[in-house]
C-alpha cells in the first residue's frame, strides 16, 4: 500500500474495510450487491531522456517546483485514456518543455515502488525553444558524459540510455547534483 487510504467505496459510497483477497490485504466493499475491490495496481508513467538535437545533443533535466534545490530529473507524465505510450511521451515533452519530438525509442520499463508507478522510459530526440510549463521551476542542459544516473526511479532510464550510447557509468553518489528528488 503506497497510496493514500480510501475511506469510501467509489461505486456505492459505503465505508471500505481491509480484508485479505487474492494473496494480499486490500480495501474491500462489503455492502450487499457491490463487491468493489481496490486493487491498487501501479499506474504507468512515461519518462523522457530528452536529447536536444539542436543544442549539441545535450540532455535536458528539469526540476519540479516541489523538489529541493539542485535536484533535477526527467520529464514525466501520465497517459491519457486511449493514448499510446509513444504518443504520450511526445505530448508530455511538448507540454512541459515545449520541444518538438523527432523520434522516440523505448529504453526500458522500471518499477517505482514508493509511488506505486511503473515507469516507461524513452530516449526522445527533440528540438525547439525550451519553455517550461507551470509544473517546472528550472532546467539544466547536461552533456551526456556529465550525467550522473541516480539509482531510483527515472535514473534507471538515464543509466540504460548511457549504456546504450556506450558512455562510461560514473560511480553513483547519493545526493549529487543531478539526483532525483525521490532519493
Ligand atoms: Zn461499494
Image (cartoon, rainbow, N blue to C red):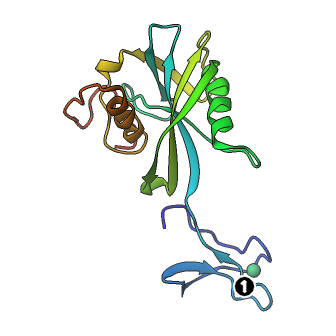
Tell me: residue 183, above or below residue 3: above
In the image, 110: left or right of 131? left
Q: Quadrant of the C terminus?
A: top left
Q: Decide which of 80, 65 is in the foreground and name it.
A: 80
Which quarter of the rendered image does ligand 1 occupy?
Answer: bottom right
Residue at 55% across, 62% down: 4
Q: Residue furthest bottom?
A: 32
Q: Decide which of 151, 32 is in the foreground and name it.
A: 151
Q: State the image coordinates of residue 26 (x, y, percent, origin top left).
A: 55, 78
Q: Quadrant of residue 35?
A: bottom right
Specify few, some or many for label 1: CA neighbours under 10 Å numbering under 14, 14-19, or 20 or more: few
Whether label 1 lies within 8 Å of ligand 1 gets the answer yes
Q: Decide which of 111, 35 is in the foreground and name it.
A: 111
* Mark 1: secondary structure: loop
Q: Quadrant of residue 41?
A: bottom right
Residue at 57% across, 46% down: 45
Q: State the image coordinates of residue 80 (x, y, percent, origin top left).
A: 72, 45
Tell me: residue 133, above or below residue 14: above
Q: State the image coordinates of residue 76 (x, y, percent, origin top left).
A: 55, 36
In the image, 166: left or right of 137? left
Q: State the image coordinates of residue 47 (x, y, percent, origin top left).
A: 52, 37
Name the residue that disc number 1 marks. 35
Q: Quadrant of residue 30?
A: bottom right
Amino acid at each position: 500500500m503506497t497510496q493514500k487510504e480510501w475511506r469510501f467505496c467509489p461505486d456505492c459510497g459505503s465505508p471500505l474495510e481491509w480484508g485479505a483477497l487474492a494473496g494480499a490485504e486490500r480495501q474491500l466493499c462489503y455492502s450487499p450487491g457491490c463487491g468493489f475491490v481496490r486493487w491498487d495496481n501501479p499506474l504507468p508513467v512515461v519518462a523522457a531522456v530528452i536529447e536536444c538535437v539542436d543544442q549539441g545533443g545535450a540532455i535536458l533535466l528539469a526540476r519540479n517546483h516541489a523538489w529541493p534545490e539542485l535536484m533535477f530529473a526527467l520529464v514525466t507524465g501520465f497517459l491519457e485514456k486511449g493514448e499510446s505510450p509513444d504518443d504520450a511521451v511526445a505530448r508530455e515533452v511538448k507540454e512541459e518543455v515545449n520541444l518538438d519530438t523527432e523520434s522516440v525509442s523505448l529504453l526500458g520499463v522500471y518499477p517505482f515502488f514508493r509511488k506505486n508507478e511503473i515507469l516507461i522510459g524513452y530516449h526522445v530526440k527533440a528540438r525547439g525553444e525550451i519553455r517550461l510549463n507551470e509544473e517546472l521551476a528550472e532546467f539544466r542542459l547536461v552533456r551526456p558524459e556529465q550525467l550522473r544516473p541516480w539509482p531510483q526511479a527515472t535514473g534507471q532510464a538515464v543509466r540504460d540510455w548511457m549504456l546504450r550510447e556506450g558512455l562510461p557509468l560514473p560511480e553513483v553518489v547519493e545526493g549529487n547534483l543531478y539526483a532525483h528528488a525521490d532519493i
